[in-house]
Image: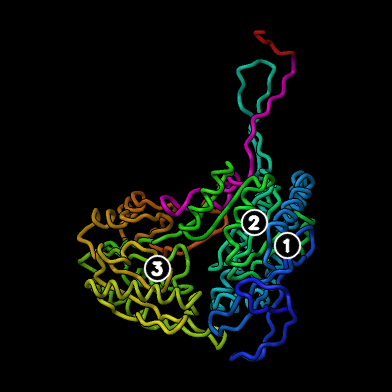
């Protein structure tokens, strides 16, 4: 094991001793780079540390890659691509199916890493593991669906094909908030399509992300097909730009904030690299006057507060018809009052910690701004270091920051409207467009509202937070572009080529 010398965010490797912490004596886990089928230290011997957001203890010491390491990893992926790109569907299917099995078998290890690095609850970890395995299995099922088609040709004796083939080396960048789901999703379909992957781990959960790669290695992934790079936070921009600009990288996918997504998109555009972006959100949840209020309140509480609201699909704006607003709000506030935050390692808690104390302070500032401008705080609102209980704000209006800013925390804003048209207008009065929901008994009317909402995802009579491996998952507007999942993802991870076969000599004008 190793730890850090006190030299800021990056240091040379030095001996480690067990750390005395409030949770007992725990030694940090050493995480290395992974390429060419084996783990390796960063070439300069640099590392960075990740602390537990609850206890402050160092839980991970990870390799801090430099530009030379990027070159080594890219070369490993490029060497592996020719053989992997022509591997049989059966080969890829077996590896992806095995990865799902290994992921389940190592659930305790994954849960421990995820809780220590992100402060997640056991419930959220279990959800990540279950869906992560399903994503692997769905990708395994897709290996025989990477087809082409015969295209009619105007030339006699010519057979014309639309032909899909692997794109090349894919760069996958996943965040910390759903590290297993989003990590697996960023790489599984790319592998199924015959691409090699460079996975850039999040600085906030390097061990959790490294374990995904280790699982694929255990499942039989050939050397160089899956590779992992970790970097110190201060080096993130330089490492990402080096990865995107490297000539072997042909595709980029990024899941994270809209602010960083714009930077990634600009980098990719400079090098004419195709980019799939799944970015921020501020999901609207519309409650029509004929909605089942008990069911709507249950779905809204789940969507707003699961994983402390740190989900891109989290319910942030609840747009409710005036005529039933008081009844609905009373039900929601009752649900929220029972959702308290605490240290997930000390037993079952409905909410765990936020990723940093600064995140909690930022959400508290949004709440303070809203109440100073007339919003009514119904429950919650206080933060204690990294903890914040479920919070409901009523009578939120447009001048308040929380009306338009993504909170990424356990708070929802109630916006009251006079009718359906105003509800749609308010729902679309937003830069983001990822997920949304509509509750109403008149299915035709609810579907019409769903159709008119400017989001990539909309659920009628269910929560804004939902995910299935086979669906086209992605957003519009400032929530990004491109789609993960199922048939839609095939276009993201393959090149569609036109190939012709001529049976007789051609006729040419010169």
User: What segment is highlighted magenta in the picture?
Assistant: 475-504
Whole-percent x and y of residue 151? 61, 27
Query: Residue 492 lies in magenta, yes or no?
Result: yes
Residue 379's quadrant in the figure?
A: bottom left
Label 3 Cα neighbours within 10 Å, binned few <14 / some 14-19 / many ≥20 = many
Q: Which mark is residue 407?
A: 3
Front position in the image: 207 or 417? 207
- Residue 93 seen from this side: no
Q: Please give the name of the residue rendered at 59% of the width and 76% of the height, measured from the top-left corner.
A: 117
Is 274 placed left or right of 90 in the picture? left
Residue 407's quadrant in the figure?
A: bottom left
Task: Report helix, strand or loop for mark 1.
Answer: helix
Per the model, the C-alpha gap separating discs 3 and 2 is 28 Å
Is 394 placed left or right of 502 in the picture? left
Identify the image quadrant of the N terminus.
Answer: bottom right
Question: Mark 1 and 2 residues: CB-CB less than 8 Å, in contact?
Answer: yes
Whole-percent x and y of residue 37? 79, 60
Task: Report helix, strand or loop for mark 3.
Answer: loop
Per the model, the C-alpha gap separating discs 1 and 2 is 10 Å
Whole-percent x and y of residue 205? 60, 70
Residue 118 drawn above or below residue 76: below
Which label lies toward us, 3 or 1? 3
Q: Which mark is residue 216?
A: 1
Residue denoted by label 2: 187
């Amino acid at each position: 094991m190793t730890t850090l010398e006190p030299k800021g965010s990056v240091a040379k490797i030095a001996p480690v001793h067990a750390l005395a912490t409030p949770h007992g004596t725990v030694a940090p886990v050493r995480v290395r780079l992974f390429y060419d089928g084996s783990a390796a230290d960063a070439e300069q011997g640099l590392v960075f540390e990740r602390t537990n957001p609850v206890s402050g203890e160092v839980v991970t010491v990870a390799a801090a890659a430099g530009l030379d390491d990027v070159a080594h990893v890219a070369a490993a992926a490029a060497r592996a691509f020719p053989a992997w790109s022509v591997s049989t569907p059966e080969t890829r299917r077996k590896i992806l199916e095995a990865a799902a099995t290994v992921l389940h078998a190592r659930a305790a290890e994954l849960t421990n890493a995820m809780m220590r690095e992100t402060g997640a609850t056991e419930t959220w970890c279990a959800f990540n593991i279950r869906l992560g395995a399903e994503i692997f299995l769905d990708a395994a099922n897709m290996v025989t669906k990477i087809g082409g088609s015969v295209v009619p040709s105007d030339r006699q004796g010519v057979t014309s094909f639309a032909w899909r083939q692997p794109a090349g080396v894919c760069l996958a960048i996943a965040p910390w908030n759903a590290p297993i789901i989003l990590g697996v999703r960023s790489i599984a379909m790319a592998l199924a399509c015959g691409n090699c992957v460079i996975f850039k781990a999040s600085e906030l959960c390097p061990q959790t992300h490294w374990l995904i790669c280790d699982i694929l290695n255990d499942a039989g992934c050939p050397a160089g097909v899956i590779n992992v790079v970790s970097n110190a936070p201060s080096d993130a921009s330089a490492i990402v730009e080096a990865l995107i600009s490297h000539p072997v990288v042909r595709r980029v996918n990024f899941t994270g904030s809209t602010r960083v997504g714009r930077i990634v998109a600009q980098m990719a555009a400079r090098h004419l690299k195709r980019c799939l972006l799944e970015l921020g959100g501020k999901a609207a949840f519309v409650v029509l006057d004929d909605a089942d209020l008990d069911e709507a309140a249950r779905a809204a509480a789940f969507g707003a507060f699961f994983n402390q609201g740190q989900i891109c699909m989290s319910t942030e704006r609840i747009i409710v018809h005036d005529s039933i607003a008081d009844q609905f709000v009373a039900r929601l506030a009752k649900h929220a009052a029972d959702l308290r935050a605490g240290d997930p390692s000390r037993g079952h808690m409905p909410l765990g910690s936020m990723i940093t104390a600064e995140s909690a302070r930022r959400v508290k500032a949004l709440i303070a701004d809203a109440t100073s401008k007339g919003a009514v705080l119904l429950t919650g609102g206080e933060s204690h270091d990294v903890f914040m209980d479920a919070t409901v704000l009523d009578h939120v209006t447009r001048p308040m920051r929380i009306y338009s800013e993504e909170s990424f925390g356990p708070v929802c804003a109630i916006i009251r409207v006079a009718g359906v048209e105003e509800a749609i207008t308010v729902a679309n009065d937003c830069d983001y467009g990822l997920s949304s929901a509509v509750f109403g008994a008149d299915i035709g009317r609810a579907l019409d509202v769903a159709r008119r909402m400017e989001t990539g995802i909309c659920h009628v009579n269910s929560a804004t937070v939902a995910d299935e491996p086979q669906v086209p998952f992605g957003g519009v507007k400032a929530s990004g572009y491109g789609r993960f999942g199922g048939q839609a993802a095939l276009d993201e991870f393959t090149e569609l080529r036109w190939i012709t076969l001529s049976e007789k000599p051609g006729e040419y004008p010169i």
